[in-house]
């Protein structure tokens, strides 16, 4: 998955449909732009925090 689809894209797709298989999510999302920059890293951090819920295993 590394290099093909960015983590933030996968997390965003899983929020929309948490039971979707990884292969379907990877087929739905587009390849991310080359550089994330500072804003992209903050967005990724927020997506990681949103994915962590009480009682669930830490994803990253």
Image (cartoon, grey):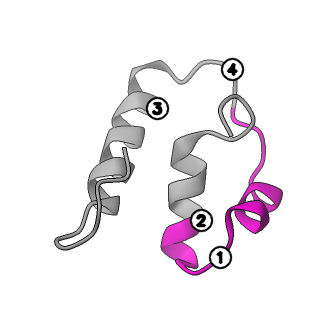
20 left or right of 28?
A: left
* Of residues 10 and 41, the one drawn nearer to the viewer in this rendering: 10
Above or below, 42 relative to 21? above
Residue 40: numbered disc: 3
Q: Is residue 30 magenta?
A: yes
Please, what secondary structure does the residue beneath circle 1 have? Answer: loop
Identify the residue position indicated by label 2 in the image.
Answer: 13
Residues drawn in magenta: 14-32
Disc 3/disc 1 C-alpha distance (Å): 24 Å
Residue 21 position within the rendered picture, expressed as x and y whole percent measured from the top left: 68, 71
Kindly identify which numbered label has been placed on residue 20: 1
Q: Mark 3 and 1 residues: CB-CB less than 8 Å, in contact?
A: no
* Residue in view at x 35 percent, y 49 percent: 48
Q: Earlier in the sequence, mark 2 or mark 1?
A: 2
Q: Earlier in the sequence, mark 4 or mark 3?
A: 4
Identify the mark nearer the N-term, 2 or 3: 2
Residue 34 image offset from top left, x and y in percent: 69, 20
């Amino acid at each position: 998955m590394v290099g093909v689809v960015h983590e933030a894209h996968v997390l965003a797709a899983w929020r929309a449909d948490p039971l979707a298989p990884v292969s379907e999510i990877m087929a739905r999302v587009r390849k991310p732009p080359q550089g994330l920059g500072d804003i992209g890293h903050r967005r990724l951090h927020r997506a990681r925090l949103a994915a962590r819920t009480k009682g669930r295993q830490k994803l990253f």
